[in-house]
Image (cartoon, helix red, strand yellow):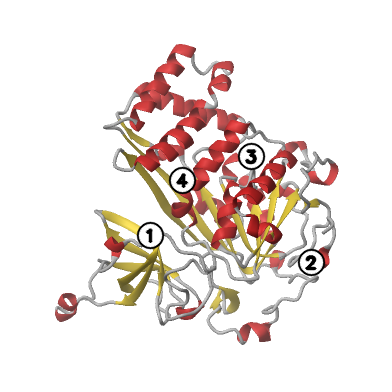
Amino acid sequence: MTAHDSAQLPFPAPVSASVYVSEAPAPEIHGAGAPASPAYVHSYVHGYSDDEARRLGDQADTLAALLHAGTAYPDGSRVLEVGCGVGAQTVHLVNGSPGAHIAALDRSATSLAQARAHLAAHAPYATDRVTWHHADLHQLPFPDASFDHLFLCFVLEHLPDPVRAATELRRVLRPGGSLTAIEGDHGSVVFHPDGPAARRVIGHQVRLQAAAGGNALMGRQLYALLTAAGFADVAVRPRTVYADASRPGLVDGFTRRTFLAMVESVRDEALGAGLTTPADWDRGIAELRRSAEPGGSFHYTFFKAVAVAPADDPQSWAEPQSWADPVGTPAARAATPGSWSHHLNGAPTRRPPAIGHRAPERYGRNPRTNGGGQRSMARDEAVIGCTGVLLIGTRGAAGPGEVLVRIRGGSETFLAWSPEPLPVGATVLVIESRGSRQVNVMEWADPLDASAGDPGDAG
């Protein structure tokens, strides 16, 4: 396929950027694919070394079940992954949505070459479903409303003007389409044994990222940011990582090879900026490493946001002109039961579909596979019999919702399926685990609460 063979693409071909689909390494491309304005030339604080590429892969693999739970796109949908980097998240996107068409975009041609190689090595069966685009996300080379869904992970935290960037993202998202954004927040770090020198080295990383035009505390700001960018139905949920000796995989994969490796990588920059001395830096890293030793523990919170392009938004109302949209007309939408609701003064809009719509069997998807015929991850038997409250309503065979369940001394979110649609706020009982963070539920009223005339609370 050539760079401009739009007849084979499920979304409009880019109007001014290069598309890489060959097996040869992508060269450095300038012009259309390079940053268009000095105002948006920003530094990636962690650099582009081979070590950083490995760290990103370790991070993505370790956190896949946590961060990608609830993100599965319908067959045939057009998904833009913004800031794909070395493809660490791309592999998990194609595995979670085997029937979707992914357009992966990054401003670094070198990273795109690494991403293509990474996908070929780890998901060779999916290479024909991903196209690679070299462009600046502030000036996306796509027509308005080109995509059904947008996905970005650890991208907004590196931008000097994330609201403006998110506004441009909204332009290429069709009305009712979903944006999923995942960000960390270094202010959420809690570790044992604690130590002032360890806190300082984390603070140095935060300052260096700010100096590069980014924000290492982005997670807590996602709701305000996406609202300011004009998105509707913004919902942000925490995704927490906790690691101690009882979870050796997380200690190694997250505490050591993700967080510690990230902080250690900015040593030279911290010393060069005069933020610390070699002795103080080494003392802080030594203190931080104790959290990965026997008796230590480490806690970090990511934030995952799902938002929708409003249906009455004049900026993004135009439908794509160069493809045949099966539900692209009001009549077709009306004939698609379950996938459209009414929102914003009665205008039709698609439900936030960051959680997949693939179908049936009794609860919409085969509870023993991931929707593509592959075996799902191990079931969580502990959640069966727990009660919770729906944060996002279920839609029967049309797709799942999200439930907040009281379990293991706290509250956790799960993708929730039910035979019939259930509304937001409904109290439900978990009756089956479908695999990693996915459950089947039924509407529930506690008999003891009912006899007292009180509807009760969630679990």
Q: Amino acid at mark 2?
A: Gln
Label 4: state its secondary structure: helix
Residue 286 location, x and y as percent?
Answer: 39, 21
Say the numbered circle drawn on residue 62.
4
* Mark 1, residue position: 378
For the residues carrying marks 1 and 3, which lies nearer the camera in this image? 1
Could you classify mark 2 by the number of other residues whose Cα lies within 10 Å: few (under 14), some (14-19), or many (20 or more)? few
Residue 359 location, x and y as percent?
Answer: 52, 77
Q: Amino acid at mark 3?
A: Pro
Classify residue 314 as left or right of residue 204.
right
Classify residue 221 as left or right of residue 121.
left
Front-lying residue, 442 or 345? 442
Q: Is residue 45 visible?
A: no
Q: Amino acid at mark 4?
A: Thr
Residue 430 location, x and y as percent?
Answer: 31, 70
For the residues carrying marks 2 and 1, which lies nearer the camera in this image? 1
Q: Earlier in the sequence, mark 4 or mark 1?
A: 4
Q: Is residue 183 visible?
A: yes
Q: Earlier in the sequence, mark 2 or mark 1?
A: 2
* Mark 2, residue position: 8
Label 1: state its secondary structure: loop
Name the image quarter holding the N terminus: bottom right
Residue depicted at 60% across the width and 29% down the height: 211
Position of residue 322 relative to residue 213, above or below, is below
Say the numbered circle drawn on residue 160.
3
Residue depicted at 39% across the width and 25% down the height: 198
Classify residue 385 as left or right of residue 286.
left
Q: Amino acid at mark 1?
A: Ala
- Give the CA distance from mark 4 to mark 2: 34 Å
Toward which corner of the image does residue 318 lie, by quadrant? bottom right
Classify residue 165 as left or right of residue 289.
right
Residue 228 location, x and y as percent?
Answer: 58, 54
